[in-house]
Amino acid sequence: MGSVALDVLDDLVAEYGELDAVLAALEDPAWDRDTPAIGFTVRHQVHHLAFSEELASLAASDPDAFRLRLAVIMSDIDAAGLAPHDLHTKNPRALLSSWRDW
């Protein structure tokens, strides 16, 4: 891996560390605060990050399993087409843990 790629990876790791610190300090009600992305809360944004990273990891490690997972996801998108239904079932600490896992 070239030095530019390593620099980008280092920057990404640093940004994730900063975001993790901000999220860990949030009180639970703040997770439902609106973000600059109209119609999205902090909870939505973190769910999106965790969900995207889970899918990217699966696509890279097991393309066949990724295709199957994608088919299931596409059959279970909410009416607005924004996210799987489990978004609001996760409490903030569980959601933060999910994001950290990926």
Image: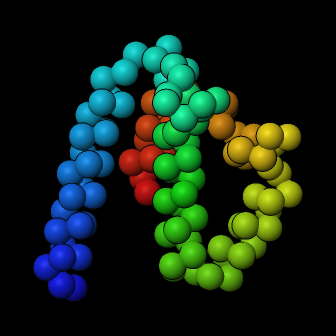
> In this view of the protein, can residue 42 be seen by the observer?
no
Q: In this view, does 38 lie to the left or right of 4?
A: right
Residue occupying image coordinates x 31% and y 39%: 19
Furthest toward the bottom, the residue is 1
Please tell me in which quadrant of the rendered image residue 44 appears.
top right
- Classify 50 as above or below 65: above
**Quadrant holding the N terminus:** bottom left
Residue occupying image coordinates x 20% and y 51%: 14
User: Along the line of sight, which residue is nearer the eye, 79 or 100?
Assistant: 79
Residue occupying image coordinates x 42% and y 52%: 101
Please tell me in which quadrant of the rendered image residue 22 appears.
top left
Query: Picture coordinates of residue 49 (x, y %)?
Result: 49, 49
**Quadrant holding the C terminus:** bottom left
> In this view of the protein, can residue 84 be seen by the observer?
yes
Query: Picture coordinates of residue 64 (x, y %)?
Result: 68, 82
- Classify 59 as above or below 90: below
Give the color scheme: rainbow, by chain, secondary structure or one colour: rainbow
